[in-house]
Amino acid sequence: MAEKGVRTQLEPVARQMYIDGKSLTAIEAELGVSRQTLSVWKGQTKKPSEEFDEWDKARARKANFGIRMEALLERELTYAEERQPGAIEGASLDNLSKLGSLVVKFRAQENTGAGYDRAKVFLENIQWIVGWLREHDPEGLKNLAADFDAMTMQFKTECMNGGNA
């Protein structure tokens, strides 16, 4: 069972694990946080006027991202193939190549069940905090902005030194 006060550390990890496709039961076993607690954390992100909570919406976005990237690549490849030979600029071909590479990397990552990305979760949490502060506590947002560089430098230092950020 997780100790009290670790929510700020474990909730973003649990959220990312859920987004990556793990069940609440699997997250419970891995993190030592009760399923009931995970359900509460998840449920607290649901806005009354919306059908899904933020965890489910993020999971759906991640699942749809690969499909959207593939559709974009397919559309752009079809457009390129319909052009006259030599009519496509090098920059366009370069962009198609990069997009294709992204699709391949995304699918490979998806297939290997890539784990928790601390930097990504950190960024997502900062974005959420900024949004919440902007809406509920503009003065708090000013304080965050004043200390932001120091906080990110500390995070980077701890990550590079293998510490727990």
Image: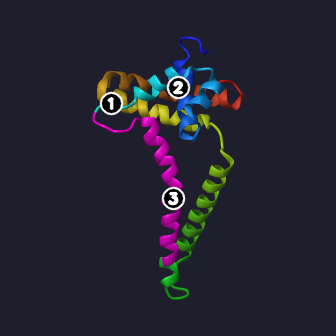
The amino acid type, in three-letter code, at marker 3 is: Ile
Between the residue at mark 1 and the residue at mark 2, the CA separation in whole angstroms equals 22 Å
Mark 1, residue position: 134
Assess disc 1: are there few (<14), some (14-19) or many (≥20) residues with their C-alpha within 10 Å of its C-alpha.
some
Q: Nearer the viewer, residue 42 or 122?
A: 42
Between the residue at mark 3 and the residue at mark 2, the CA separation in whole angstroms equals 28 Å
Decide which of tag 3 and tag 2 comes sooner along the chain: 2
Residue range in magenta is 49-78
Q: Quadrant of the C terminus?
A: top right
Mark 3, residue position: 67
Question: Which residue appears at 53% of the width and 74% of the height?
Answer: 77
Q: Nearer the viewer, residue 84 or 79?
A: 79
Question: Which residue appears at 37% of the width and 31% of the height?
Answer: 46
Mark 2, residue position: 11
Q: Is residue 79 above or below residue 12?
A: below
Give residue 1's quadrant in the image.
Answer: top right
Residue 165 seen in the figure: no
**Farthest top residue?**
4
